[in-house]
């Protein structure tokens, strides 16, 4: 947009300069042409006076000598004819009475008329200036003098003036463009770029993003409307989080009291087959409430990215989970650093390994840390029954449970929390059906190298100085 505005503004400025320069050059060319015409017309008039005596006496030798000297000095050609259009004296080769333009001027001169002012001698035209004057005494026309004057001097002067005017125009356009157009376009576009950047940050989840109210009045009003919209979005998000947090908090105490009452029933001799399902459902409700509370806190605060040694954290966490699996293989190369929150790897790996333990019990599980382009992947692959193809795309949605796992304990919020936490730091959660059976889940984090290049993986205004 900046290039287009600069191009249009510069073109209009150039067109304006052209409309000013063309009349100036035209006026200058006309003046130089008229100066040459007046000068040569005076010479033709002088030769007409000299020719009068030569035509009356019949002796044109002296006149021919004068014409030769004149042509040597001023170039061009001159011809003198009598009333019968016979050449009396001439000098130069271009004054040929058989030329149409020379014959026309000679006819006008023999009728007693002088030459009209010529048109402008432009550099791209090769025409010479033809000037004629009658020779006579009183009302009698004795002959005519016709001069063919070259216009090269006028054309050179006009060409030089045109080049100088063009150079001055280009310099004026450049100076005006740099001193006026560029700052003016910047003044207009700066608020637009600021508003676009604020909108991008808001779309990425930075609810504190606001636009600066600068520039033209229309853009200031637009920035005010955007800020008002951002305020409403932030308020709505805060109210939503507060509602979930308040609801989770308010449900916590009744659920705890409910569990205690059910346990008291067991102490008082209530049948175990009636008490245990109630306790299981109470525990499930507590887990759901806690997960909702965790999910509501995602995005509540600005995330500050920092380097995280993914390999070290993965190896440590897998050591804690090792007793839960018959076979747990870990591949984590040393010094694999990514960007994220300090507890993100633990949260993600706990959820992934918990799902592998619940949905693929007894199967081998493989955990790998893989640097890939601008990302670092934490990959968990099990060899269990996996998921139906239609269910794979839904993994990570809130409360989603695969159709074959409806009776397995869980809230359906674990991977939703992991996905939200990863997106909060510029990462992502990717799920595949593994070849040979099983499921492969990848938690992807932006690498430190990618962030150092100023990648868009940096979320919510985090700067390299924060890493």
Image (cartoon, grey):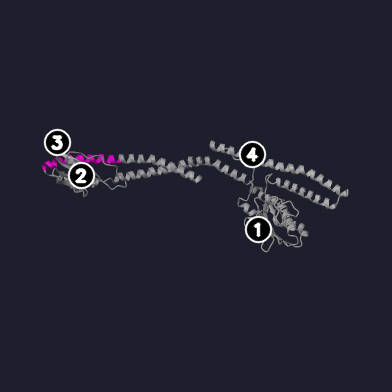
Q: Residue beneath label 2, please?
A: 104
Where is residue 114 shown, x and y percent of the image? Answer: 21, 39
Give the Cα separation between the discs numbered 4 and 3: 100 Å
Front tag of 1 and 4? 1
Residue position for label 3: 139
Which residue does the image show at 82% across and 47% down from the upper left?
259
Residue ID for mark 1: 389
Indicate which label's residue lies in the foreground, 1 or 2: 1
| Residue annotated with mark 4 | 232
Mark sitting earlier along the chain (3/2): 2
Q: Earlier in the sequence, mark 1 or mark 4?
A: 4
Considering the numbered disc 2 on the image, is that residue within a helix, a strand or a loop?
helix
Closest to the camera, between mark 4 and mark 3, is 4
Q: CA distance from mark 1 to mark 4?
A: 39 Å
State how far apart marks 4 and 2 are (Cα): 88 Å
- Label 3: element kind: loop
């Amino acid at each position: 947009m900046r290039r287009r505005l600069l191009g249009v503004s510069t073109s209009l400025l150039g067109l304006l300069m052209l409309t000013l320069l063309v009349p100036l050059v035209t006026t200058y060319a006309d003046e130089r042409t008229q100066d040459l015409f007046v000068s040569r017309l005076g010479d033709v008039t002088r030769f007409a006076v000299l020719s009068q005596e030569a035509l009356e006496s019949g002796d044109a030798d002296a006149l021919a000598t004068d014409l030769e000297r004149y042509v040597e000095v001023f170039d061009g050609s001159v011809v003198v004819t009598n009333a019968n259009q016979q050449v009396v004296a001439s000098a130069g080769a271009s004054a040929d009475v058989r030329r149409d333009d020379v014959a026309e001027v000679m006819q006008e001169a023999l009728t007693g008329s002088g030459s009209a002012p010529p048109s402008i001698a432009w550099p791209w035209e090769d025409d010479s200036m033809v000037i004629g004057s009658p020779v006579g005494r009183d009302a009698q026309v004795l002959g005519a003098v016709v001069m063919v004057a070259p216009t090269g001097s006028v054309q050179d002067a006009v060409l030089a003036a045109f080049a100088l005017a063009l150079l001055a125009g280009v310099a004026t356009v450049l100076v005006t463009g740099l001193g006026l157009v560029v700052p003016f376009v910047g003044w207009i576009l700066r608020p637009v770029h600021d508003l676009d950047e604020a909108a991008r940050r808001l779309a990425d989840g930075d609810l504190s993003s606001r636009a600066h109210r600068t520039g033209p009045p229309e853009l200031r009003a637009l920035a005010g409307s955007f800020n008002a919209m951002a305020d409403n979005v932030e308020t709505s998000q805060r109210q939503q989080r507060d509602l979930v947090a308040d609801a989770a908090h308010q449900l916590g105490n009744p659920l705890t009291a409910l569990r205690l009452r059910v346990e008291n029933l067991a102490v008082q001799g209530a049948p175990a087959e009636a008490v245990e399902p109630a306790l299981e459902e109470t525990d499930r409700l507590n887990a759901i409430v806690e997960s909702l509370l965790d999910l509501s806190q995602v995005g509540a605060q600005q995330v500050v990215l920092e380097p995280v040694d993914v390999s070290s954290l993965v190896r440590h966490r897998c050591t804690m989970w090792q007793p839960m699996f018959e076979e747990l293989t870990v591949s984590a190369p040393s010094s694999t650093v990514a960007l994220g929150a300090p507890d993100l790897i633990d949260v993600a790996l706990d959820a992934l390994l918990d799902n592998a333990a619940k949905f693929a019990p007894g199967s081998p599980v493989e955990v790998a840390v893989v640097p890939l382009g601008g990302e670092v992947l934490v990959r968990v692959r099990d060899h269990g029954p996996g998921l139906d193809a239609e269910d794979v795309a839904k993994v990570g949605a809130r409360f989603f449970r695969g159709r074959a796992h409806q009776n397995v304990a869980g809230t359906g919020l674990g991977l939703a929390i992991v996905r939200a936490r990863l997106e909060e730091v510029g990462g992502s959660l990717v799920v595949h059906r593994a070849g040979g059976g099983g499921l492969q889940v990848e938690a992807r984090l932006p690498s430190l190298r990618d962030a150092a290049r100023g990648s868009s993986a940096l979320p919510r205004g985090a700067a390299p100085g924060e890493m």
